[in-house]
Image (spheres, rainbow, N blue to C red):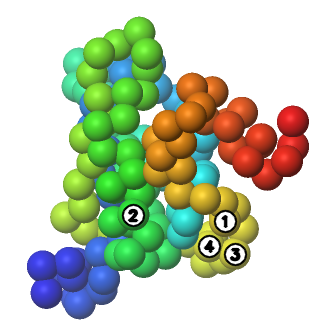
Amino acid sequence: IFFRAMYGEELCTVCVRGLPPDVRERELYLLFHGCQGYEYAQLNVAAGVEPICFARFDSLSSAANCLQALQGFQFDPQIPEVLGLELARRNLPSRQGAAQHAPQHVIPTAWHTNADSNLHPPMHMMQQYGQQ
């Protein structure tokens, strides 16, 4: 019941804080596109207020996996702040066909689980799939 938005819809939108003030939508796409079930993100920026991002997923399960994978992630290595994620109070509107066009890659937790490698995450993923 807690995970239901208004009108009984399952919550599947994540709210992200801790982003740098100069964040761009393209960077958010790169952050989320590897998360299973990612549909799209919306960046809210206002002068004098920290940017907030909302990312919609195809299900509560996908949103929860992303939340767990990116919680505490340092988005910008030059800024000590880390990402804080939580389920949003309500969902972003659904976009017809968005889930069909979203890439279905591994969840970014794979970036953190390979203790034998200190490679940058995208390079590590490319080697994992044999694309060197």
Crowd tier of the residue under label 1, counting other residues whose Cα lies within 10 Å: few below 14, some 14–19, many 20 or above: some
Closer to the camera in the image, 53 or 60 = 60
Query: Quick one: which residue is furthest to the right in this view?
Result: 131
The kind of residue tagged 3 is Gln
User: Residue at coordinates 41% horizontally, 57% vertically from top-left?
Assistant: 66
Residues at marks 4 and 3 touching, judged by CB atoms closer than 8 Å: yes
* Label ID, residue 65: 2
Query: Quick one: which residue is furthest to the left in this view?
Result: 2
The kind of residue tagged 4 is Ala
Q: Quadrant of residue 47?
A: top left
The C terminus - image quarter: top right
Mark 1–mark 3 Cα distance, whole angstroms, equals 9 Å
Among the two numbered marks 1 and 2 on one chain, the one whose residue lies closer to the N terminus: 2
Query: Quick one: which residue is furthest to the front in this view?
Result: 116
The image position of residue 100, as x and y in percent, is 69, 75
Q: Mark 1 points at which residue?
A: 104
Q: In this view, does 29 lie to the left or right of 7?
A: right
Query: Quick one: which residue is furthest to the top in this view?
Result: 78
Among the two numbered marks 3 and 2 on one chain, the one whose residue lies closer to the N terminus: 2
Q: Is mark 3 on a helix, strand or loop?
A: helix
Question: Can residue 49 be seen here?
Answer: yes
The N terminus - image quarter: bottom left
Mark 3–mark 2 Cα distance, whole angstroms, equals 19 Å
